[in-house]
Image (tube, rainbow, N blue to C red):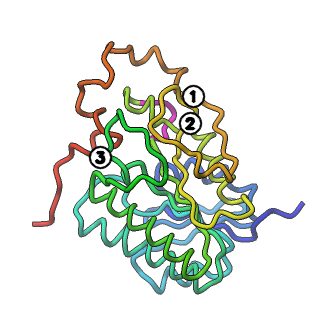
Amino acid sequence: MAKPFKRLLLTGAAGGLGKVLRDRIKPWADVVVLSDIADMGEAREGEEIVQCDLADKAAVMKMMEGVDAVLHFGGISTENTFENIMQANILGTANIYEAAHKKGVKRIVFASSNHTVGFYRNTDYIDAAAPTRPDSFYGVSKCFGEQLASYYWDRTGLETVSLRIGSSFPEPKDRRMMVTWLSYDDLVEALRRSLFATRVGFTILFGMSDNEVAWWDNSKASHLGYKPKDSSSQFDANFPDSGEYPDKNASVTYHGGAFALAEVRYKD
């Protein structure tokens, strides 16, 4: 049986989620092109490895040759200096979109982040129409990526699902992550729906599992058909309720948690 794509590009393949996705996305393409600046080891069956700095426009253009769709997870995934964020997350994403447009790619799934709205408080319940409120330079870079995706959709017809990933780990690490947790299986399902929905235009999807408490409303992405199956409730015993909500702990005051409290870092 023919696979949906001939060549599917995964950027950030050496990162935490890239490693999780490496084998799980293989059924979707004849060849999965794995990209990162870090070592990804030896290519396995059905893989092609490209060591690429996304800030290098010519290298990105070459890598995009023959690609049908992109899972863009490349870049810095934590707070950093603006100078580093600018190269990896802003210039790198701009190069990905321009190369995708020039090479005829039809769809990108952009690994955005809850940190685009990180300064909303834990008493706020928002949907994709809520104005962005980034909590860090990292969050600002993801806002840029979303706006770039919107621009390329309106200007060129290149479709994007911006997946605002919450906290995708084997299990929640604290009480905030009980709300923002996205299981690996639900992450893969969100990507599958984002790639294979008939038409997505420019869509924002909050990446969360079916958790008992929610800060985000996915009704504006209902056309994707994403229905998470996992829930953080299985980890309730790990985080006894303090009896106070909202919690007085500042790290859970905001949707972005500790990112909203991190010291802003400039290059000296």
User: Which residue occupies 62% across, 78% down?
Assistant: 157
Locate residue 242: give its quadrant.
top left
Identify the amino acid type marked 2.
Answer: Ser
State the residue in front, 199 or 15: 199
The secondary structure type at the circle numbered 3 is loop
Question: Measuring 66% from the left and 51% from the top, which residue is drawn there?
Answer: 23
Name the amino acid, label 3. Phe
Q: Amino acid at mark 1?
A: Ser
- Residues packed near mark 3 inside 10 Å, few (<14), some (14 to 19) or many (20 plus): many
Q: Earlier in the sequence, mark 3 or mark 1?
A: 3
Q: Is residue 241 magenta?
A: no
Q: Which residue is mark 2?
A: 209
Numbered tag placed on residue 119 in the rendering:
3
| Label 3 with label 1: CB-CB less than 8 Å | no
Question: Where 174 falls versus 243 (above or below)?
Answer: below
- Mark 2 or mark 3: whose residue is earlier in sequence: 3
Q: Position of residue 22 (x, y in %)?
A: 61, 54
User: What secondary structure is marked by label 2?
Assistant: loop
- Image position of 208 with respect to 50: above or below: above
Residue visible at 37% across and 54% down in the picture = 116
User: How much space separates mark 2 and mark 1, taking CA atoms?
Assistant: 6 Å
Confirm or deny contact between disc 2 and disc 3 (CB under 8 A). Answer: no
Q: Which mark is residue 251?
A: none
Query: What segment carries the magenta color?
Result: 167-172
C-alpha separation, residue under disc 3 versus residue under disc 1: 24 Å
Number of the front mark, 2 or 3: 3
Going by the image, does 91 lie left or right of 17? left
Name the residue beneath numbered marker 1.
Answer: 231
Q: Tags 2 and 1 in contact by the CB under 8 Å rule?
A: yes
Residue with the most extreme left position: 268
